[in-house]
Amino acid sequence: MLKQVQQAFAEQGALSKAIAGFKAREPQKLMAASVTKSIENGSALVVEAGTGTGKTYAYLVPALLSGKKVILSTGTKNLQEQLYFRDLPTVLKALALPVDTSLLKGRSNYLCLFRLDQHYQHVPTADAAVINDLSLIKKWSNETQSGDIGELTYIAEDSKALPLVTSTADNCLGKDCPSYEDCYLLRARKKAMQADLVVVNHHLFFADMALKDTGFGELLPNMDVVIFDEAHQIPDIASEYFGETLSSRTLLDLCKELELICKTELRDHPQLSKTADKLATLVRDWRLLWSDEPERGNWRDSSKRPDVQLALTRVSEAMGMLYQVLKGSLGRNEVVDHCFERLALAKTQLEKLQDVSKTGVSFWYETTRQHISLHLTPLSIADKFRELVFAEKRSWIFTSATLSVDQGFAHYSEQMGLQQADTLLLDSPFDYQQQAMLLVPRYLPEPNDARMGKALLKLAVPLIEANQGRCFFLFTSHRMLQWMANELPQHLSLPVLVQGSTSKRLLLEQFVETKHAVLLGTGSFWEGVDVRGDTLSCVIIDKLPFASPDDPLLQARNEDCQLKGQDPFALVQLPQAVITLKQGVGRLIRDVSDRGVLVICDNRLVTRPYGSVFLKSLPPMRRSRDLQAAVKFLTDLPK
């Protein structure tokens, strides 16, 4: 097979003949050869492929030529669609291969016909926008072949109607559903079972692995090759699914469904409606014990608060009462039977989450404006993941532009239990010395100094003006982002776009169309955003992205490290911050013709010993501490 792969990437090979302007790069050929070897040997491979390597083709070509069954998992739904609708057809056409492919999303991406009929006949709200959206969805339901909610481009991504017409693992009736034979999710899963290559995303992969959800649990045993793109996200995502979670939303949704059933099919059962309503009221009261603003905290500590203990005792008692009422109603209705099973599971989860004496895990909570969720997260997934990867002879490929720290894979391999895996580190083919400059400005206050906001503003304005906008300003906290969102427009005549003002997709479209804007963003804009050309030629990062010391999961991992006699800063905090910084830096240079300035506004890069670990992990840009040098670099760029 290696010979076939090499021929595909050759100067006059299948890819260059079929794809205009394609020219294989040396790192891409090296990666393709390593992936081929891993597929042939049924072994594990960890590859960091720097931006511009062409890693997508480097794993797609060997996977497709192998003739084996492949699962390909990506970081997000958007990347999943890009891969399935753009990259995969291009390579298949070039190689002229008759490979059967399938796109499988999580269940919330598919229309549930039963829930549509249920809520269309009995709209649970007087909200005109929801009623209008339900009407549009009903019309679309008669036209769609796939039932993929992504087709509904004329409905807002956050429409309140969408949860009403999609199912969750909790509320799906499975084989008891009246619309089971016409289920779009079931069709998508059947197609995936028969396909040679299935494209999923990490959340779906781990949710269904952990929950043994019907359908996908049967998919992995049939597969010979598993490829994870954007593999740096896996430790956090897998941890989430190998733990326990209970949200107030889960309980309130269950109560809403029972209320709807009592209004329609079980009107003779007022006790069920009253008991469900009592539980819903107590769950809302529990949420009110925290501030309106979203927060994360240590559940071990908070669970000891007397008011929290009292509220949870009441919720637990109300769940017990509802459990008994539902038990006496079994057999009368499919939804009631299913709600009984869900409530039984929620009772068990709450008991586990209230027993905070367990070790080796982190107990934490998170609030949104309306809900609270409790989490039990294992501090390490290495043992579980090692068992999954090495249980059977199968090829596993893990790739991303950001897996290494200080030119090594020790951190990632230990996190994932992949010490036995082969590794490959490929630098980007871009000429960073010519294409980019790294500015670490002099005379900045310490990152947490109260004067930092004004210093950032004073620094950013001349850079943004010299570049005529075309800038991402990335923050490690929402607080600093909001402060800058209020101050920056007073000093600039250019458009300022702020994360949270509209959806991420629309913000990016506005940024590209405006051409001379500055976009202020936090977490989600640090990765998975691809703006090429001169539309983006300056990235400013407010400080090194160390996780908040208040983060309960970080605290628990630090404590665990200390108990083992290890250094939590060196083994937990520093590696994670390096990988996050590399993601943010990767927004700047996306193509061979891109040029620009990266600004990291944190003196610790040069004043702390660990600064060298960050610098060694970044692309080899020319460096400066002189603001005027960066301004000149930007001014000289073609506008």
Image: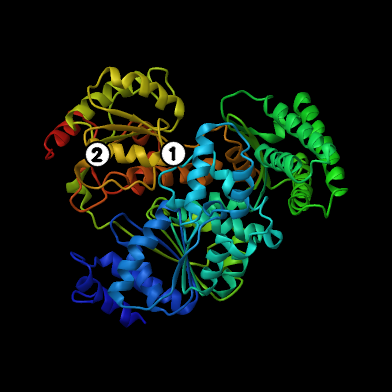
Please say if 585 is above or below 98: above
Mark 2: few, some, or many residues within 10 Å (few <14, many ≥20)?
Answer: few
Q: Is residue 447 visible?
A: no
Q: Secondary structure at mark 2?
A: helix
- Residue 425, percent across and down? 37, 61
Q: Amino acid at mark 1?
A: Gly
Is residue 101 positioned above or below 379 on the image? below
Image quadrant where one finds the C terminus? top left
Corner quadrant of residue 463: top left
Q: Are marks 1 and 2 in contact (CB under 8 Å)?
A: no
The residue that mark 1 highlights is 523
Badge 1: residue crowd in 10 Å (few <14, some 14–19, many ≥20): some
Q: Amino acid at mark 2?
A: Glu
User: Which quarter of the figure has residue 209?
Assistant: bottom right
Say above or below: 30 vs 586. Answer: below
> How many numbered badges does the structure rendering display?
2
Is residue 504 toward the left or the right of residue 414 in the image? left
Q: Position of residue 297 (x, y in %)?
A: 62, 32
Question: Which residue is drawn at the image coordinates 83% and 46% (left, top)?
Answer: 326
- Residue 351 visible in the picture: yes
Q: Classify 444 as above or below 237.
A: above
Residue at 54% across, 41% down: 161
Q: Secondary structure at mark 1?
A: helix
> Residue 83, position in %: x, y?
38, 60
Real-space Cα separation, disc 1 to disc 2, in angstroms: 23 Å
Instruction: Say which of 214 and 381 sits in front.
Output: 214
Q: Which residue is mark 2?
A: 513
